Image (cartoon, rainbow, N blue to C red):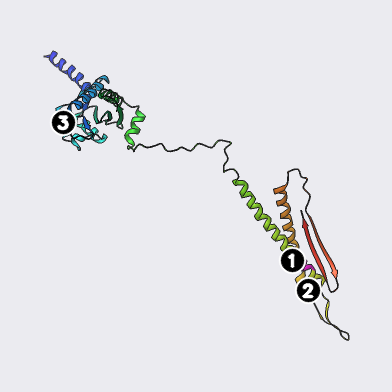
Amino acid sequence: MMRTVLYALVGLLLAGPALAEQVAVLPVEYRLVGEDAPAPEKARMVSEQLSAAIVEAGKEPLGGAPVAAALEQVEGGAACSERSCLSELGAQLGVAQVIAASVAESGALYELRIAVADREPLTGRITGPFSAALTEVKRLAGEALTPLPEPVAEATAATPQTPEGPPEPVAEPAGPDAPATPPGEDDGDEDRRVRVLRGGAWGLTAAGGAALIAGVVLLLVDDPCVEDDPQHGCKERLDTTVPGMPLAGLGGIAAGLGVAGLVFIGRDDEGDGTGDEPPAETALGVTPLPGGAAASYRVSF
C-alpha cells in the first residue's frame, strides 16, 4: 500500500513540470492566394514543423481535441492569433505557451507568421520550394519559443505593437566646431545693426549741429536795435538770448553724442585692431557778418 502511494506521489511530481512545459499548437491557417480551396495536407506539414520546434526547445506539444474545445470558449475562436487571445487560451489550457502559425502561398512565394502570447509576432517571406518554407517555419517557431531576457520581455508586454515603418531620422549632435547658426547669418545681422546705429548717430549729429548753429546765431544777433529813433534812441530791441542759450546748449550735447557714436561705430566696424585709427575731428566756425553772423559745423573721422 505504501509503495503504491509513493509511486503516485512521484508520478504527480513528474507530471506537474511536464504539464507546465506544454505548448499548445493551434490549427495552422494555410491560404492559397487566389484560390478558395483549402490545403489541409500542407497545413498538416506546417503543424508538424511547429511540433518539431517545440520538442527541440525541450517542451511538449499539445493539440487535438483539448485545443479545439478551448478555442470554442475564447473570443475569436479558430481565428485566435492575437496575443490577448493566445494568453487567454493558454490560461484555459493550463500550458506554458500557445503558438499559432499562418501561411499565405502565392506561386513560389510564401508569407509566414508565427505568433505566441508573450512577444510580438514573427514574420518571414520565402521564395522557393515548399520545403524551404517548412524550414523557415521551424526556424521562426524556435525563435518564438526562445525566452526573451527579462527586461526585454517586460518592455514587450507593456508596449503596444506599432506598425512597422522607416526609422525616424535622428539629429546628429553638434560637434565643438559646428557653427551655431548658418555661415554668414551673424555677419548679415551685425551689418544691419551697424547700419542702423550709424544712421541714428548721423541723424543725432546733424540735428544737434543744426540746433547748435541756430542757437549761436540767436546769441550773436541778440539785442540789436530793430528800430532806431534819433531823438529817443532805440525804440525796439530784439532779445534772442532766452531761446538761443538752451538751443545752443542742447544742440552741442546732441552733436557731441552723435560724433562720439560715429567715432565708436567707425572704429569698431572698420578698425584693424592696431590702435592706429585717426581720431575724429570736429570744427565749429562762426563768421561775423554785417547785421548778423554765419556759422559752420564740420565733422570728419
The numbered disc on residue 240 is: 2
What is the magenta segment's predominant secondary structure? helix
Report the span colored magenta. Answer: 209-216
Q: Secondary structure at mark 1?
A: helix
Which residue of the protein is positioned furthest toward the right in this rendering? 231
- Given the current orientation, which residue lies at the most extreme bottom position? 231
Q: Nearer the viewer, residue 40 or 119?
A: 40
- Please tell me whether residue 69 is drawn above or below residue 2 in the rendered image: below
Mark 1 or 2: the one toward you: 1
- Left of 114 or right of it: where is 36? left
- Badge 1: residue crowd in 10 Å (few <14, some 14–19, many ≥20): many
- Which numbered circle lies on residue 224? none
Q: Is residue 238 above or below residue 177?
A: below
As drawn, the label of residue 68 is 3
Residue 21 visible, this orientation: no
Amino acid identity at mark 2: Thr
Q: Residue at x 74, y 53 (%)?
A: 263
Type of amino acid at the residue the image marks with label 3: Ala
Which residue is rendered at x = 17% and y = 28% of the image?
40
Depth order, front residue of 127/292? 127
Tell which tag, 2 or 3, sits nearer the viewer.
Answer: 3
Amino acid on which disc 1 is placed: Ala
- Relative to 210, is 72 above or below? above
**Looking at the rendering, which quadrant does residue 17 occupy?**
top left
Mark 1 — residue?
211
- Residue 214 falls inside the magenta stretch: yes
Indicate left or right for 239 with 98 as reference. Answer: right
Tell me the element at label 2: loop
Under tag 3, what secondary structure? helix
- Which numbered disc, 1 or 2, marks the residue that appears first in the sequence? 1
C-alpha separation, residue under disc 1 versus residue under disc 2: 14 Å
